Each structure stands twice: as structure tokens, then as C-alpha cells.
Image (cartoon, grey):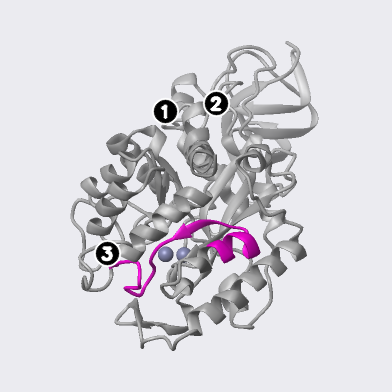
Amino acid sequence: MRLHWNDLGTPRAERANGRTVELSGFPLTVLPIGGAAHFLMMAEPGCCQGCVPANRLAVVEVFADHPLKLGNGPLRLIGTWQVSFDPDGWRYQLCGAEVKPGVTRRALMAASPLFCLPVPAMAQAADGTAIDIHSHAGNLIPMSFGRGQFAAVAEPMRQGGVSTICLAVVADSPIIKLADGRLRPSREPRSGELYEFSRRAFEKLHALAREQGLPIIRTSAELRAARANRPSLIVSSEGADFLEGKIERLDEAYQRWALRHLQLTHYRPNELGDIQTEPSVHGGLTPFGAEVIRRCNQMGIVVDVAHGTYDLVKQAAAVTTKPLVLSHTSLTDRPAAWTRRILPDHARAIAATGGVIGIWPVTGYFPNIVAYAEGFAKMAELVGIDHVGLGTDQLGLVGSSTLPSYADLPQLAAALRAKFTADETAKLLGGNYQRVFQASLG
Ligand SMILES: [Zn+2]
Ligand SMILES: [Zn+2]
């Protein structure tokens, strides 16, 4: 089969593993030499000898049984395609490579390289500072009910260059059920029920952190220092239902569970306010919701208004003295009924607080990584590059995810780098959240 450079980082390149493939590209050697049996190949000529992109997906490592003649022009090679799972190595190798004569430069350029990055353009994943601002990784939701087993978290984070995840317990889990294709409250919780459930869920979260060796971040200095070689987590709750209207429980969660990121509402219109997926009952934010925001601002807890209605968001923006996060959504201008996506004004209200909107990898909205990157671009175009982030909702999605594993993050980084500079990509994949975290915690 013939591979193109824009197949790299896609399932097509993965499926080619072990097959004989043809690939055209430019050889790159550290020294200007006439022939080599082991060299790197890229989509475009390097800007100088030894200029290698940092992106593991933009380069193919070539092994030949005898030295191949290398000129300044392109080569068309045939060999056995190997996908490498070594996190420190190149992703793709062409083994037993032989030259197939006859490629023209024009034909090569028509192959339209997608990924070709200059040296300083480190894909974010490569420097290991990416932050997922909404996650249930490690099988946390079933484990909160005492079902199943923890799944690997730290290793895929290391592989993908993710330094930190905001790992969320789901405070209203016991009473929400899938009905008519969406999650809805099935009954009123009993008094104390969601507090008790959340206490057990926070315990499980801490057990997961211990099992996986993930330090828990409590200060903005710790987040600044976090790197993927020793990944960490921020304790988060999806829904403040465990408060049951009692503000002192926020202090308790801060102290006892190191809660530093709180999403006000989830799938139940709760004591704090209204949600996107049920009819409004409070007209937005309740007085208790406003009190919780003020207390979060004082104590140093990031306020997340995901799932809240536009009215709730506007009212929260008027109350908060710190930037707001809306951790998992995407932009739409034609919202379906009860959608979790947001309209442009909803997004602008978050950005106006200096906050961050996490883009949610729902396959129904973004069927592949390139479309997902486009979702970031659309939001950034509307609200600015400083107000967009990564919100995977890992192991929390009802359907499938475009980014099911942290190990896949380099593919997203590469797709983003086709649209953004290295600095911009770094902001999208963590820098923006880090700024909000710093502003919220001091
Ligand atoms: Zn959610
Ligand atoms: Zn979630």
C-alpha cells in the first residue's frame, strides 16, 4: 500500500503495521553524506542538516540492509512498516527499505504534508506539560460504586505527555440514569445520600492516586512544576450535590479531600442552579450557588460551570472574582434540544472572566483527531487563543471518544500544530488552565 504523510497519526498508519508500504519523502541525516543505511525521512526537506521535528509523528525512521544513495532530492522507498510503541523513539519505522526510482518533486509535493514542524516547534506532548481539565480516568465512576478495577492512568499520561488531569468524582451518580438517549435524574436523592456517596467516591479517588503513584496537586506552584514523567492529578467534583446546601462541607472537601476544582452542577438541577439538559427551575444560579462561588474564590478552588445553563453562567460571571472554567463542551450555532454544546454568547461569557473552555472529544461531533483539532480552532477563533483547553471527559462519555487514551495526545498535538504555533498549542493543551488555576488559588 502507499502511505502519505497525512496518514501519519491516523488509524491508517497504525493499520499498516507489518505491511509492505511505499512512502516518498526527504531523507535527513545529521551529516551531509552521500549514502546511509539508517536515516530519518520527513515530508519536506529539512531547513538545515540535522533539523529534526520534535513531533514523533512527523518523522519516519528508515532502516535499509545496505546504504541507500541520498541526494538533496526526494526518495521513494518501499519497505516494511513498523509502528513503534517506544515512547522515547520515533513512532514509525520503515524496515528493509529499498529505493523505488522515478519519483518527481512535483508528485511529492502533491502529497500535501500535514505534519512538518520546525525544530523549536515542540509538539506540546513532547514537553510533558499538557493538562486535561475534565477526566474520570482510571475507571473512577464504576469504582465509586465498588465495581470493577482501577485502570492504568499514570502510564498513558507519561506516554502522551500529560502532566496533570482534573480527576472528577460524580456527585449525583446514584440518581442519574440514561433515558431517551440522555442522562437524567431518575429520582430525588435521600437526605445525606449524595454526601455519603461522594465521600466514598473521594476515598476511591485517593486510593487510585496512591495505586497509580499520582501526586495530588494542592497549590499552583505544584501545578507549575508538574511534568508528564511524574504525572499528577487535581481533585475535582462533577456536581456540588454533596454539599446538600451546606457551605461548611466545601471547607471540609478542601481540607479532607484536597478538592481544588468544583463543577457546580451536573445532570440534576441541584441546590446551586440550573442545567442545560433539564427545564430551568431556578432561573439560573441560586443564592446558595452564588455563596459557593464566593467561598471557592476565597479558599482557592477553581469554579467550573460545565452543564450549567447560559443564565447560570451569566450570573456566575457576575458573582465570581476569579476566571470561570467550562470544562467540557464545544461550539455550535444550531443547538439541538437539551444539548451540552454552547452558543457563541455562552462561550464569550466564559472568556470575559478570563476563563477557559475545554473542548470535548465526543465522536458524534468530532469523528477524528483532525476534526477535534478543528473544534479547538473554531472556539479559539471566537473567544481567543487564551480561553480554550482540553476537556476529554475520559471514561465519562456515554458514547465513544475521539481521544480515548492519553497516549494518543501527541496525535492531537500534531493536528493542532497544523493550525497553531507551538506557543499557542501549549496554551490550548495546558497553559491556559494553568493560568486560571494560578488566578484561582493564588
Ligand atoms: Zn459532564
Ligand atoms: Zn464528566
**Total marks in image:** 3
Q: Is residue 213 left or right of residue 374?
A: right
Could you say whether the residue bearing mark 2 is in a helix, strand or loop? loop
Location of mark 1 (residue): 110
Q: What numbered label is drawn on residue 117?
A: 2
Foreground residue among 68 and 233:
233
Q: Which residue is mark 3?
A: 339
Q: Is mark 1 within 8 Å of ligand 2?
A: no
Distance from Cα at disc 1 to Cα at disc 2: 18 Å
Under mark 1, the amino acid is Ala
Q: Is residue 26 left or right of residue 298?
A: right
The three-letter amino acid code for the residue at tag 2 is: Leu
Q: Earlier in the sequence, mark 3 or mark 2?
A: 2
Tell me if mark 1 has few (under 14), some (14-19) or many (20+) residues whose alpha carbon lies within 10 angstroms of its own. Answer: few
Q: Which residues are magenta?
A: 251-276
Q: Looking at the image, is 350 positioned above or below residue 261?
A: above
Q: How far is the residue under mark 3 from the one under mark 2?
A: 37 Å
Pick out the residue farthest to the right: 66
Can residue 85 be seen in the rendering of this structure? yes
Q: Position of residue 178 (x, y in %)?
A: 38, 81
Asked if 177 appears above or below 374 in the picture, the reply is below
Query: What residue is at 66 percent from the left and 72 percent from the top?
Result: 203
**Residue 213 falls in image quadrant:** bottom right
Q: Residue 367 lies in magenta, yes or no? A: no
Q: Are marks 1 and 2 in contact (CB under 8 Å)?
A: no
Q: Give residue 182's position: percent from left, percent from top.
A: 33, 76
Foreground mark, 3 or 1?
Answer: 3
